Amino acid sequence: MVEHFKAAQWHVVYTLPRHEKKAARELELQGLEYWLPLHKVRRNWSDRRKWIEEPLFKSYLFVLVNAKNYFEILNTYGIVRYIYHEGKPAIVRDEQMETLRRLLDSSYEMEVTPLQLTPGQRVRVEQGPLMGQTGILIKQSSNQSVRVDFDILQRSVVVTVPLKFIRPVDEG
């Protein structure tokens, strides 16, 4: 796993729910480089309204990874796992990081929304026991899961899969 590193690269890690800031503090204490993009949102409570900073991507952190710190990052409190894309650790290019930083420094209002999928769309499972399988999206059951029809042994098998495991297949 670690042998794919030639130089330090930005990776994405998944954190425990609402542990982004805690995991970032732990990485900082270890002297490891990370980035937690934050944005200001206005929250309303029954007795007051307040602007707070919250993670732009809930449960995700960007970490600068090399062969030496790969497992150190993974063993940090609050970090669950590395994010994978097509069976390999997801690497974020420096240009993408810079674009995101510029966007956050701008005055643009932004919101991160779930992936927009439509019934009939071809999708691939990126994680879990069905990783690598492609199927047809039947319906989105909720903001958390989708139902996907897989052709297995010339039989239609409809499975409910977590939304975060699914990516659209580029037909182009």
Image (cartoon, rainbow, N blue to C red):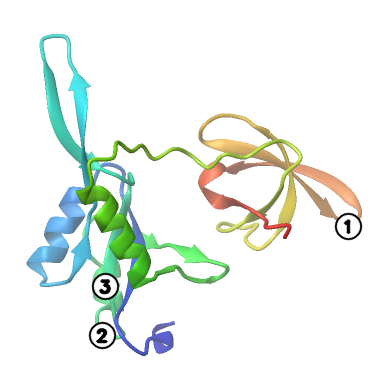
Residue at image mark 1 = 153
Mark closest to the chain's N terminus, 2 or 1: 2
Q: Identify which residue, 19 or 102, lies in the foreground.
A: 102
Compared to residue 49, the image places residue 83 above or below, namely below
Per the image, label 2 sits on a secondary structure element best described as loop
Mark closest to the chain's N terminus, 3 or 1: 3
Residue 57 image offset from top left, x and y in percent: 33, 46
Q: Callout 1, which amino acid? A: Leu
- Left or right: residue 138 compared with residue 7: right
> Is residue 79 visible in this depiction of the protein?
no
Q: Nearer the viewer, mark 2 or mark 3?
A: 3
Q: Callout 2, which amino acid? A: Lys
Residue under the image location 33 percent in, 38 percent down:
110
Per the image, label 3 sits on a secondary structure element best described as strand
CA–CA distance in space, label 2 to label 1: 44 Å
Q: Nearer the viewer, mark 2 or mark 1?
A: 2
Residue under the image location 33 percent in, 53 percent down:
60
Residue 141 image offset from top left, x and y in percent: 61, 30
| Count of number-bearing discs | 3
**Which image quadrant is residue 51 in?**
top left
Residue 131 image offset from top left, x and y in percent: 62, 60
Residue at image mark 2 = 68
**Which image quadrant is residue 62 in?**
bottom left
CA–CA distance in space, label 2 to label 3: 11 Å
- Left or right: residue 93 compared with residue 61: right
Residue at image mark 3 = 64
Q: Identify which residue, 82 or 57, lies in the foreground.
A: 57
Residue under the image location 62 percent in, 40 percent down:
117
Q: Quarter holding the N terminus?
A: bottom left
